[in-house]
Image: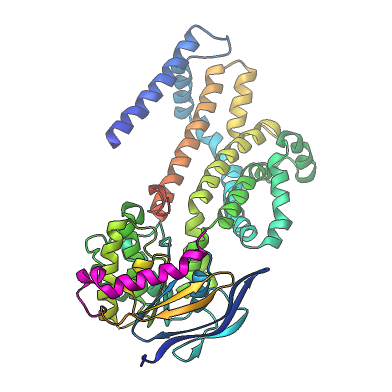
Amino acid sequence: MPRRSLILKLLSALIVFGAWEIAGRIPVSFAFPTFLESMQSLIVMTVDGTIFQAYAETLKPLVIGITISAFFGIGIGLWTGLSARFDWLFSPVFIVMQAAPLAALIPLLVMAYGIGLTSKVFVVCIMAMPVIVLNTSSAVRNTPASIKEMATSFLASDRDLILKIIIPAASPVIFSGLRLGISAGFIGAILAELKITPTGVGDIISYSRSIADYPSMYAAIFSIIALAVVFLNLLERLETFLFAGNNRGYASD
Amino acid sequence: MAPQSAVSVRNVSKKYNDVEALRDLSLEFPRGQLTSLLGPSGCGKTTLLKIIAGLIPANSGEVEVNGIRVEGPGPDRAFVFQDFALLPWANVMRNVGFGLELRGIAKSEREAIAEKYISNVGLAGFERSFPHELSGGMRQRVGLARALAVDAQVLLLDEPFSAVDEQNRRKFQEDMLTLVQEERKTFIFVTHSIEEAVYVSDQIAVLLPRPSRVSEVIRPTSFRNKDAANIRRDPEYLDIVDRIWASLRNYVE
């Protein structure tokens, strides 16, 4: 089985990159380089170290923002899921945050926090946190009543109930919230670099576009997507490591 | 002369909003025997069982277990759930040991106890399986083993076999007879199956609905010590089944 899925993955990569290469060769547009050209400039940037310098900049707001969002997002989500009063207090904030057009808010953030790291971290958090909070709290609210009752009948304390029943039961949905939140965080980080001050990967993208070095531009975009995919894969590993029974269906279905 | 009571229910009433579930219900449960609560659906038998378990409070009246008034769940009672209420993320070993885990018993000790009860209910070899890998009957054996493992004097079973197929059910019923004799515990067994109640019980309390009250208590005398295979042919067994059906049929829509 793992062999077959590996073959399928390679095959789908081959199809996508092949289509990219063909589209680049037609060419679809003057501004659309081929896959091989883009990979070439990615190699050039890797060899001369530009890409590493860029990521050193980009990863700062990204990592800080995602850490804050994951930590506080899950915390607030648990809290609002467990207590109707805090749900009432906090949920609207995150629903509004999720619906707000972020690009329109950026000037406000810049006015309040300047053009430095703080604003960029905020952008990442605004993108990543709402979905983490909302997923966590709805997962907590939907813990099956019968296993909570079971734990109570076997003398679980409130702490046991949260740590041994509610969190593990909510974990699949919490993790799917994390996956969505982190991918949104990646979008936020790049958006911040394009809209606030051009640094890191955002700088490569906007600079190479301005000098019509399209292969470098696409190489940078490609690298950030690749990084996001690797990151999400690691998260999935973490989930199966922490909750072995999770992705194997449920006793009740 | 009935043996001393392990559980006494005195003048218990319970209302859900305006619906009267139980009215002034009193019943004695003899120690070391199996008592069935039998009645049509909606007659409050599960409500009564959960009041005895301390999972829901009664509006008035009192429940005593071994002379001590029930205020909430306690170590003297263990519950077997209709829908099994297993932890889907935990294997059989952890599920069976879960009651002991909540009591703070060390891992090695609780696994030794769990292992014993896993083999007692006939699941040896499945210790590392997850609930979704087991059949319905096997899942309920896990639920039963979990309740036995905490070594409570009173076992409360809420329609434990209703989600189990007919053949497994019969096997379960035979196992129950052996279990009652070997474990010397008090069993309180909720069921809607007349045959099942008469087959396994030392005492059958027939409940009538709206609001629920005990209409009669039947104690089979002649076939209880016979071989399990012959019970269903015993004239007294057949008489009791007929008599209960005669009194219940008016209440079935």
Tell me: residue B214, above or below residue B128.
below
Which residue does the image show at 75% across and 45% down from the upper left?
A: A113
Q: Is residue A23 left or right of residue B93?
A: right
Q: Is residue B225 magenta?
A: yes
Q: Is residue B55 magenta?
A: no
Question: Magenta part of the protein: which range?
Answer: B224-253
Which residue does the image show at 56% across and 55% down from the upper left?
A: A142
* Residue A136 placement (x, y as % from top left): 58, 52
Tell me: residue A27, above or below residue A242.
above
Give the color scheme: rainbow, by chain, secondary structure or one colour. rainbow
Q: Is residue A111 left or right of residue B29?
A: right
Tell me: residue B208, above or below residue A248.
below
Q: Viewer-proximal residue, B155 or B12?
A: B12
Q: Viewer-proximal residue, A34 or B57?
A: B57
* Residue A182 placement (x, y as % from top left): 55, 42
* Residue A210 placement (x, y as % from top left): 65, 19
What is the magenta segment's predominant secondary structure? Answer: helix
